[in-house]
Image: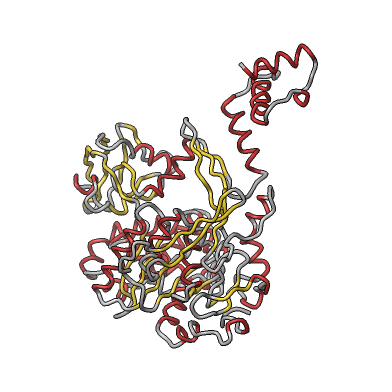
Amino acid sequence: MIVAALIAAAAVTGITARDINMTQNQKLRMAEAAVAQLYVDTVDENKLVEDAIRGMLEGLDPHSSYTNPEETRELTEPLSGNFSGIGITFNMNQDTLYVIQTVAGGPSERVGILAGDRIVAVNDSTIAGVKMKNSDIMKRLRGPKGTDVDVKVLRPEGLAYDTIDFTITRADIPIYSVDASYMVDDKTGYIRVNKFAAETSKEVAKALSALKKEGMEQLILDLVDNGGGYLNAAVDILGELLPPESLAVYTEGVNSSRADSHANPSGLKPLFDKGRLVVMVNQYSASAAEITSGAIQDWDRGVIVGRRTFGKGLVQRPIPFPDGSMMRLTVAHYYTPTGRDIQKPYTKGNQKDYNLDILDRYNRGELMHEDSIHYNDSLKVNTLRLGRGIYGGGGISPDRFVALDTTAYTKYYRNVMAKGLINRFVIKYVDANRKKIKDRFKTDREFISGFEVTPEMLDELRKLSDKEGVEYDAEEAEKSRPLFCMVLKGLIGRDIYDNSTYYKVYNTYDPIFRKALEVINSDEYDKILSPADPPSERLPLPVR
């Protein structure tokens, strides 16, 4: 009524919006109503409002954002800890849904779905031979807990396929944050965390307890490519790694007073607050991953190995709308215990340059050469226990730099990967050799030590690539041979054993992991974590 009255008054008297003593909120509502009611063509009011919100946020920082109801569900589901579905990991292979694994104890495993099965129909709708996105497949398979979904499965039986119909009752399916957890050697444990979600701290605690029972005395925590997630998950994980009540992070903004978050404020005994600790990071480690690695570095609790992290240190407050959409508004900055601002510099409204930052680092040589990294001495601080010099200014800089190795990433390898040909090859290979491999290698440890990717396998991959129009380059193929062999072996191991098997294979190749293992098993660890004397005059060993 207020908006209508304002419009009517303006039309009669000829006065403008500026002449009316209105609030900014009324002005916005008046503009929306005017466009909706007076514009020459029909407009979608929902889109009009969404565009207005997005327009407001675009002029702010790079991380304030708006998502419609569907986008909001897709954004929050991976962090919620579970969803309702049938409990499978799958790949689309030439328009056919191929089951890689079933979730242990999940609905599909309980009715007898097996790895290697092809789901060709869902609720009488054929999905085989139809080009569909993974998101479209998931919409068909997921649904409310307790509801049924009928699926038709093709199962390889010797040289033929058997058709089997299943009715699966959907249930809550956990979304795991820990990709892998295993003993690297007699005393070194390894945990890979892919995100910081609702259940992540419980998963990490479970992994720590299991590894300690296997004799773990030192830990490699892998946060490479971890884009972050919930602040509380990072603080809770730090509660298992730092002395009780240590400051983990604090937040502060112009309209938000300082708020401290302490690790393990209840004072319970941490699972691993002593023993060597190395944290792996790279340029895609962000947000909660930076909170975790930053606190460990600030307190001299462990050594950070890899490359400078992303630099996402802005706190977003979710503001939900009744229709299920959401605005995530930046309200504060994250600061490490020493006071370092995690957020890298940005210009308000300039999303393009911000998004190109990683490419700019590559072009400057920062990802390949430590000499190309330049630090601002005015942003130098000293660590809290040993007084080592470390730097702020955006992201967490490692104690030991590891260059990005691109020698094996050739154009030929990229083109083979882009067409999904490695996955297609692995699916076909595992189909034909699953029983033979499991009979020969009873455990993944035996598989890792004994299985080799043969020249014949690489030749078959080449033939598949030729058939799909990927131009063969002998020189590039040879450069990428170690990478092809590693990925093929890792994916075959994953499909036959479990997800950890892939990382057990990949880590033998990964330069950051190899450096982390070298540091944790040598006196280099003690040299890095040695007291500065005097603190204000000594820089940390890896930084210059």
Residue 464 image offset from top left, x and y in percent? 44, 58
Residue 72 image offset from top left, x and y in percent? 47, 40
Res 410 seen here: no
Specify whether 106 is left or right of 80. left
In the picture shown, does residue 333 fall above or below 68? below
Res 467 seen here: yes
28 or 374, which is in the foreground? 28
Image quarter where the C terminus lies is bottom right
457 or 342, which is in the foreground? 342
In the picture shown, does residue 409 fall above or below 329? below
Residue 185 image offset from top left, x and y in percent? 32, 79
| Residue at x 78%, y 22% (from the top left corner) | 16
| Residue at x 61%, y 38% (from the top left corner) | 54
274 or 247, which is in the foreground? 247
| Residue at x 59%, y 62% (from the top left corner) | 341
Residue 141 image offset from top left, x and y in percent? 33, 39
Image quarter where the N terminus lies is top right
- Give the residue furthest to the top: 12
299 or 142, which is in the foreground? 299
